[in-house]
Amino acid sequence: MLMIVACRCIGAFAQDMVEETPYIKMMGTADSAIAKGDWVVAEKCLRSAMRIEPANPANLLLLSNLGMVQFYQGQDSLALNTLTDACNIAPRTVPVLANRATVYEATGRYEDALADCNIILEIDSANVRARAMRINYNLRNGKIDEAEADLDTLLRYSPDNHLGNILAGNIYASTGRYAEAISPISKVIEHNPQAEYYAVRALCRIMTGNLNDASMDIAEGLNINPLEGELYLYRAMLNKMRYRNDDAKNDAKRAVQLGVSQQRTLPFMK
């Protein structure tokens, strides 16, 4: 949450001040509300702070934060209006642009999100979030070469970045480079063992013939989340390869129940 970082920075600044002004006190209350996810109180405090000191330069970030608080309350249009007001005040301020790009992406306005990301990367070429969003945009539109070029840049700036490794694993797996995908996905799992990541690695290991490790990945993933449909799909694939046709069929049916498309399970239903 970009706006939480901004508020905490202001809060840290407040601690260094000899006298805690009403403006700073209000920011402290807003910070506490944000940390608790109490968006209604946070919005009230942010508005109050800006009214107390309307000429304070920090109000640019507060306005941006207000837009995100509105977004978290489901007020998408209002949030975009607020964030656009902040961008109009300072068109090349990275935290403000990043917040607006986040809302654009979440509401399906991908071209607008891309435009903000392009500006961010002109200002800060090492910005991971903006580059990751542009990678996702290019993948969504089948622009694999452009996505990979951005991925190479992202990993050059930040080779162990969690988001970068997720994107690398997904790109390599989706383009059939399963052996290459295993290393970045393993790094992701090491720091954040989630069922969906075990599923990606299980598929890669199946496709590279490492069936025993794939089976262990599926078991680990299901232990974390027994409702991850992809894991049942890949277990059906494994069972089919091991001539356990009844088990494969049962896993394929379970995968469909959990949201996997029936078309993807057809080879394991026979």
Image (cartoon, rainbow, N blue to C red):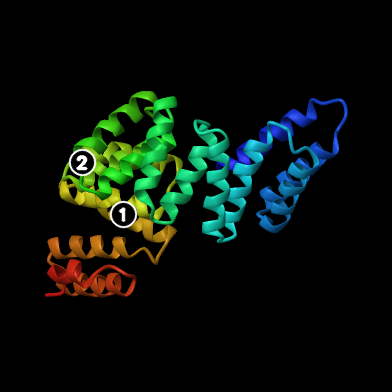
- Residue that appears at 45% across and 40% down: 191
Q: Which of 246 and 8 is in front in this view?
A: 8
* Place of residue 48 in the rendered image (x, y in percent of width and height, measured from the top left): 77, 47
Q: In this view, does 220 lie to the left or right of 203?
A: right
Which disc is residue 211 wearing? Answer: none
- Mark in the foreground, 1 or 2: 2
Task: Kindly identify the residue that appears in the image at 20 percent across and 74 percent down.
Answer: 249
Q: Give the image location of residue 252, x and y in percent.
A: 23, 71
* Left or right of 1 in this view: 121: left
Q: Where is residue 167 in the image (x, y as percent from the top left)?
A: 32, 41
Instruction: Estimate the spatial distance between the alpha carbons at disc 1 and disc 2, rounded to whole Å.
Output: 22 Å
Label 2: few (<14), some (14–19) or many (≥20) C-alpha neighbours in 10 Å: some
Q: Check disc 2 and report its element: helix, strand or loop.
A: helix
Secondary-structure class at tag 1: helix
Seen from this angle, which residue lies furthest right? Answer: 19
Which quadrant: the C terminus?
bottom left
Q: Earlier in the sequence, mark 1 or mark 2?
A: 2
Q: Which amino acid does label 2 sit on?
A: Ile
Is residue 185 something one can see in this rendering? no
For the point 21% across and 42% down, the residue is 143
- Kindly identify the amino acid type of the residue bearing the numbered disc 1: Ala
Q: Name the residue under label 1.
A: 199
- Residue drawn at x 56%, y 60% is 75
Name the residue tied to disc 2.
144
Q: For residue 127, what is the image quadrant? A: top left
How many marks the image carries: the answer is 2
Quick one: 41 or 165, which is closer to the camera? Answer: 41
